Amino acid sequence: MRIAVLSGKGGTGKTLVSVNLATVAEKATYIDCDVEEPNGHLFFKPNNIESQDISVKVPYVKQEDCNGCRTCVSFCKYNALAYIGEKVIVFDDVCHSCGGCVLLCPQHAMSEKAKYVGNIKKGTSENVTVITGILNIGVASGVPIISELLKRPLDKGTDFIVIDCPPGSSCAVMESIKDADYCILVAEPTIFGAHNLKMVHDLVRLFGKPYGVVLNKCQDGDNPSERFCIENNINILMKIAFDSELGKFNSNAEIAARVDSKYRDMFTGLLQLVAKEVSHETATSP
Amino acid sequence: MKQLLVLSGKGGTGKTTIATAFIKLAQAKAYADCDVDAPNLHLIMQQSTDAIQSDYYGLPKAEINLIRCIQCNLCRQACRFDAISIRDDDFGYVVNYYACEGCGVCEAICPMKAVSLNPAIAGELLLYKDEAVFSTAKLSMGSGTNGLLVTEVKKQLLSAAKATELAVIDGSPGIGCPVIASLSGVDMVLIVVEPSISGISDMERIVKTAGKFNVDTVVCINKYDTNFENTEKIEQYCKKHKLHIVGKVPYDANAVKAINNGQSIVDIDCVSGNAVKECFNETIKILI
Amino acid sequence: MKIAMPVNEKSMETTICHSFGRTPYFLVFDTKSMESVFAHNSAATSQGGAGVKAAQAIVDLGVEALITPRCGENAAEVIKTANIKMYKTINESIKDNIQAFNDSKLSTLDEIHAGFHNQAGK
């Protein structure tokens, strides 16, 4: 079962929910796809770290074979190539690794080399296998790392996977939810939260994913995100009240479900609810 | 014109809440929302006129002409983004709009000229010219090219509000290109940080990023009383890196109420509003 | 010799643009013939790699010196590889900068900033 946890907005509690959900399962894998600012590992503090560098392919030119036709420079949609002083220069950082220049060079003067863009670390924290992706500062697209994170073969016996997605609805988010069985949308009770919930709601519907909402930091008074769910017949899985104790655990990067049985029970309840939703989906889908 | 940019690194720290407070306190005649992925400023800074809207074009998207497609599979093999697949009805190949990165390899390699690269709208720019000039934008779902859109938002603001004294810019979270694009040409950056381990970690990344631009940087600690230990850690970090802290704002349940009423925290009488007023005064002293 | 500057409009009275890669136009001024040509910068609307494309255009225009307030690292690499000299503008006025160049009063541009790398993915 692959559960993706997302929110339109940062700071709503996506990591809180995904980390605690993975914790209360018997055995789980937690995958942090927020490769620009991964935070899950700060909570899990995993051990036995295995590290894997991730690279993309960028072109390099065999200058002696180049005849200066500039086909590559004109073709490149990303302006990653320049022709100066009878040499082709490659700008790795804007290259999208499409391979077009290599394919099209009439002199076959181009080939490819690896460019290191980030890293994936795998470790364990009690019952959870923690897989974290991190993008190097200066690299533009996290999509290759996310793709790799989700491709990795999983340990035997783990069939519960929680995917902590990046905020927003960009292509990085799309990549993260691609193969999810179910999506949990986390929202906070402000008009900002409701506005951004709508965005991510549109996204999961576009992808045809079954989903439910967790309302976090709920207080007395009007909850625009709750209103949005009610108005649109969206299943509210759970309401987490604003709780300064929970907030404190979170700000100290402590996993609430490991520290206090009250939270353990709360997230176990959520896990059971989600599992029921997923099996219901499998039973009723063609 | 002096430009003040509000950044946070991590989302949810209160960047937009504080930016709107600053706009109201300064009675700023020019402001912009550079968080083009999830713009929120317009929810508080309600405008009475309609915006001038313009389309924002991102990377082009490939499209396959089914009549010409002979299913030779060359495009599918060559596509590095797994964006081409066989149609369900087997009538040919189809491009996944969201996965396509507009590289043009399929167009170049197709022997039947069955593929074309078409301009694709990736978002929209909005410019409000009311009592103040407000520039904002919205990136469409699945898009990635937000650095350029941020640049367009700022360009739009600067050309519409040339004579203004102060412009307040609500930046985007993260440390990537949209943040770097918003940093261009600003006079001062205000980093809003919350006292959590992840908030501090993200603040450090953003200080490093802003540092490369040699821009005056000041810090405001929001919801500081939710964790005094971490607040102290932030204070020590700022002292070590010679970053001026313009103020500390307490957690305030009334802030949420104000925001949900479409008001800024300085429109009502509340503790966070008062604390932000002090941050504002301190920031302006340094900026102007 | 030909010198270039990023400018905001096609007029000698306009101001110098604060960005090199995304400037709307380049002014190419011939110091010998005193002729000026305004070239449209196609890199201004590029999704990414604007600095590279703008710098390539400068090279192709046969410019020998570039006067600009700032320059990103990718553009700088192209400019330096082409042996084009880079100078820092003294103010926003085209005429003042041309004068300063002729009087050898301009200093070389040494601080190159990190690129903006506007492109897909977040």
Image (tube, coloured by chain):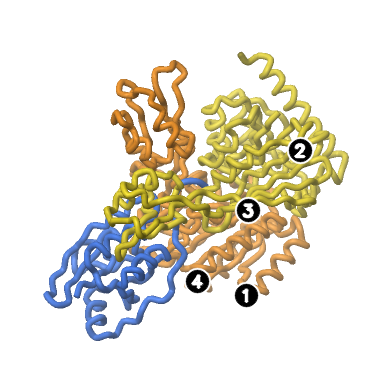
Q: Comparing marks 2 and 1, which lies closer to the viewer? A: 2
- CA distance separating discs 3 and 4: 24 Å
- Could you tell me which secondary element the residue under label 4 belongs to? loop
Image location of residue B163, percent across then percent down? 34, 64
On the image, numbered disc 1 is attached to which residue?
B242
Chain A, which colour?
Answer: yellow
The kind of residue on which mark 1 rests is: Lys
- The chain painted blue is C
Would you name the residue on which mark 2 appears? A22
Chain containing the residue with disc 4:
B
Amino acid at circle 4: Asn
Image coordinates for residue A156, horizontal then vertical, percent? 77, 33
Q: Do labels 4 and 1 share a chain?
A: yes
Calculate the distance from the C-alpha at mark 4 to the C-alpha at mark 2.
Answer: 42 Å
Front: mark 2 or 3: 2
Q: In which quarter of the image is the N terminus of chain C?
A: bottom left
- Residue located farthest toward the front when viewing the structure as drawn: A64
Name the residue type under label 2.
Ala
- Residue position for label 4: B214
- Sequence-first tag of 1 and 3: 3
B113 displayed left or right of B134: left
Q: Are marks 3 and 4 on the same chain?
A: yes
Q: Distance between the residues labelled 2 and 1?
A: 40 Å
Q: Residue B13 carries which label?
A: 3
Question: Is there a contact, CB below 8 Å, between mark 4 and mark 2?
Answer: no
Tag 3's secondary structure? loop
Location of residue A59 with respect to C75 vertically, above or below: above
Label 3: chain? B
Display colour for chain B: orange
